[in-house]
Amino acid sequence: TGRLSLIAGPCQMESRDHAFMVAGTLKELCAKLGIGLVYKSSFDKANRTSLSAERGIGLEKGMEVFADLKKEFGFPVITDVHTAEQCAEVAKVVDVLQIPAFLCRQTDLLIAAARTGRVVNVKKGQFLAPWDMKNVLKKLNASGNPNVLLCERGASFGYNTLVSDMRSLPIMAAMGAPVIFDATHSVAQPGGQGDSSGGQREFVETLARAAVATGIAGVFLETHQDPDNAPSDGPNMVYLKDMPRLLEKLLAFDAIAKA
Amino acid sequence: TGRLSLIAGPCQMESRDHAFMVAGTLKELCAKLGIGLVYKSSFDKANRTSLSAERGIGLEKGMEVFADLKKEFGFPVITDVHTAEQCAEVAKVVDVLQIPAFLCRQTDLLIAAARTGRVVNVKKGQFLAPWDMKNVLKKLNASGNPNVLLCERGASFGYNTLVSDMRSLPIMAAMGAPVIFDATHSVAQPGGQGDSSGGQREFVETLARAAVATGIAGVFLETHQDPDNAPSDGPNMVYLKDMPRLLEKLLAFDAIAKA
Amino acid sequence: TGRLSLIAGPCQMESRDHAFMVAGTLKELCAKLGIGLVYKSSFDKANRTSLSAERGIGLEKGMEVFADLKKEFGFPVITDVHTAEQCAEVAKVVDVLQIPAFLCRQTDLLIAAARTGRVVNVKKGQFLAPWDMKNVLKKLNASGNPNVLLCERGASFGYNTLVSDMRSLPIMAAMGAPVIFDATHSVAQPGGQGDSSGGQREFVETLARAAVATGIAGVFLETHQDPDNAPSDGPNMVYLKDMPRLLEKLLAFDAIAKA
Amino acid sequence: TGRLSLIAGPCQMESRDHAFMVAGTLKELCAKLGIGLVYKSSFDKANRTSLSAERGIGLEKGMEVFADLKKEFGFPVITDVHTAEQCAEVAKVVDVLQIPAFLCRQTDLLIAAARTGRVVNVKKGQFLAPWDMKNVLKKLNASGNPNVLLCERGASFGYNTLVSDMRSLPIMAAMGAPVIFDATHSVAQPGGQGDSSGGQREFVETLARAAVATGIAGVFLETHQDPDNAPSDGPNMVYLKDMPRLLEKLLAFDAIAKA
């Protein structure tokens, strides 16, 4: 197994300028550290806690910006899809289609994503056991797509709380798919602020270190220059300025994990 | 609050003949017991554990049968919708649109269902706290639809297990919506049989009694003349022949609960 | 199975006068309702959250008061034991020895309690599955005591939260022991107030109704004339003045459950 | 913070010869790796699932062997205490008194252990949140003992399952006490084999790596030359022959964690 990869970016695509700023910073950092980057942002937040919360830049505009980012920086990009219809359109530009955790059992969405031929990153549902993901993987493989990433992002643990069971990482790896640990949403507190989700940024590093030490293919980290003013997932995004030190640490653990 | 209502029917719409057989039996039984019936069946099982599992009769054929059932028996019908696009089409015939638990946070689906003007029954996600449902309710109400039912169907409790927290029933009732207890899916064991979900039919009555005793608007019970050979949810459906005794018991508890 | 029994009293034995006041009120009420009463109080709270919290009246004084209560009112009494050494001493006076939930796997305590020949009421540990109680029951039976009550008081559900799985009641009843539902500690929020446990008195009735509707041998309810000023378990004790209405309701459900 | 320490040994003290064999092997290994060893064994298993399961060598004999082990190998030893009475007796020989998880809220036991002046290692109850341990720590400190270790060993997660929440490690460390991760009992499956507990030896390394990467004071690992024939905790003990490679790996992670 190769070196740790990174899926990173701001939760939402806020604007072309913002995307270019964050992408440029991450590109430079990853080049310096020798870590493969897949740039992540969402063009639509389809399951916000509240109706009045910011939804995002939209599909059409989002695809334009992703295309420009790819041309400028040369990295692959990842974004989440919410309906079967979106898949083919998104796949024209985006390299990795991400299936949101709540939707990881929706057969039509899985089939449509698989049929694009793009890599599919499936978030494990908060309501699933790690071994249940073999059925999700089978749906994707049986639809003709062998390129699947399985992503841990926490399991429901009582109310408004997720827990990261590190055993899930080797369990899913044994299914033959590269495993990603989403250290951003694993520290989310769903519904924890009443009309929005809370988060525990202070535990991102704890969980990321733990996951990387078990030996995983990649880590997923949402990041922002000013998380507390970001339109979504602010409480659990990492400060962009803290990424260098965090990634250096994770790479050191990764080297030991795979020695 | 009025008398206990019943949402019942086979999990899947298997065929016109089968639908008429079950519907006729339930209609007669409910008339005899003086219990309001909403007939339930799914035209598509969109999130089966396995790709090869039976999906169902399909939307077009399903709507035809629902229309005929309504004409014959005069009861309202309920079915689940999976995409925003389906809502308007389904609402031409179906009286109550049901939002599946996994999809209860999908904003576009909630808005589309709400805008049909039909009653919307939202299953509480296995990953949500009861108080989180106020945000779901708000999305529906803010989309112009005051006619919402909130449905408990179990919360994630470790792996492959759901638990029914009876406190959720008064918590959701306090939001002002009628509360339904789904005694069929509350005894499901998600992923419990490896490539399909298991269930504990033997606890349907236990949980239904408990829920009715707390004082609820309605109970949801899937039923079949031969559950072990049904195409889905067999392990947790009630035998059609056991419905009379079960409903009589529940009505007796309901009378005490609301005295 | 006979009529619902009641285990009730204030959490702590506060003083002789207080014990006689509550006992007299409960005795009169139960005589009127025709419900069998086992009077409960603790002489020592051995696992308080905080060291400075009130421990109780002590064993010697406690036994004196229990003896006087029994002479005056003629009811059996129940109290919890915390060490093997206490069992024989307590059994001289007390009719039912209660094993606290945290201690339900302590072999020496179980053996000592069993060997007194008194009835033993074991609280199911918050960390146990209902089917695990068959091993606890076996330890007691194998120590020569067939008179065991099994008591549900909630299972750990994430942090600082308990959930009552109503399936546990028939599961434990199938082991051949009478099953008690503790509606007081089932609504506790362990550690929920930082340096003491919280509680949700408002859900005592919800859970008690639910449990009784499944058909149980008895209900356990701590009660106090002024819970908010009680030395322990205040947030989840029922007001003494609310007991008549609550018990009448529960008896009505019990009659249906056992019809 | 210093280098990772190790608490290790066979679950039960089986015999003097067996203790010397395992202790000698561990002593040599730890000397070679430069890791501080605290030798662990239980003289009594006080909460076995089943009455007929092996209890152990007993207090008196156990203390003799511990004294001889200390004389021969010069390491400190740790064992668990179950009653307040045992504490002073055990403390004559044993350097670290361990409070079992089920008993971590028993005030008298905590006070008695604290008053011996020995170091106290408290296992966090499976039913406690990490932040609840500050009350346990306070009970020990307020009894005059500042030398407390806090030990994570998994939290209840549904039935017969524990989950290790790695966030608990920094949360407890912030209370000012050294934190130990028990990688043996964290992979236990309480009651998982019907009349005994199961375990997942294959995940010991996964969880130990994860915990060490977060930066902890010590790791707790039960080990045996032939776990499958050990009298207790066989399914989750590590093969003695696998300890060198495992510890080398953990020390490499520890160095990065504390760099």
Image (cartoon, coloured by chain):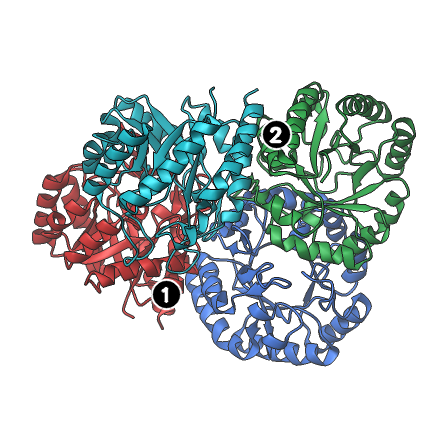
Chain colours: A blue, B green, C cyan, D red
- Do we see residue B188 in this rendering? no
Q: Label 1 amino acid? A: Gly
Q: Residue at x 33, y 28 (%)?
A: C75
What's the mark number on residue B204?
A: 2
Of badges 1 and 2, nearer the viewer stands 2
SS class, disc 1: loop
Q: Residue at x 53, y 29 (%)?
A: C251
Residue D2: x and y in percent read 27, 69
User: Marks 1 and 2, how far apart in space?
Assistant: 47 Å
Q: Determine the chain carrying the residue at label 1.
A: D
Residue D217: x and y in percent read 30, 63
Q: Determine the chain carrying the residue at label 2.
A: B
Residue topped by disc 1: D215
SS class, disc 2: helix
Q: Residue at x 28, y 66 (%)?
A: D3
Residue A254: x and y in percent read 46, 64
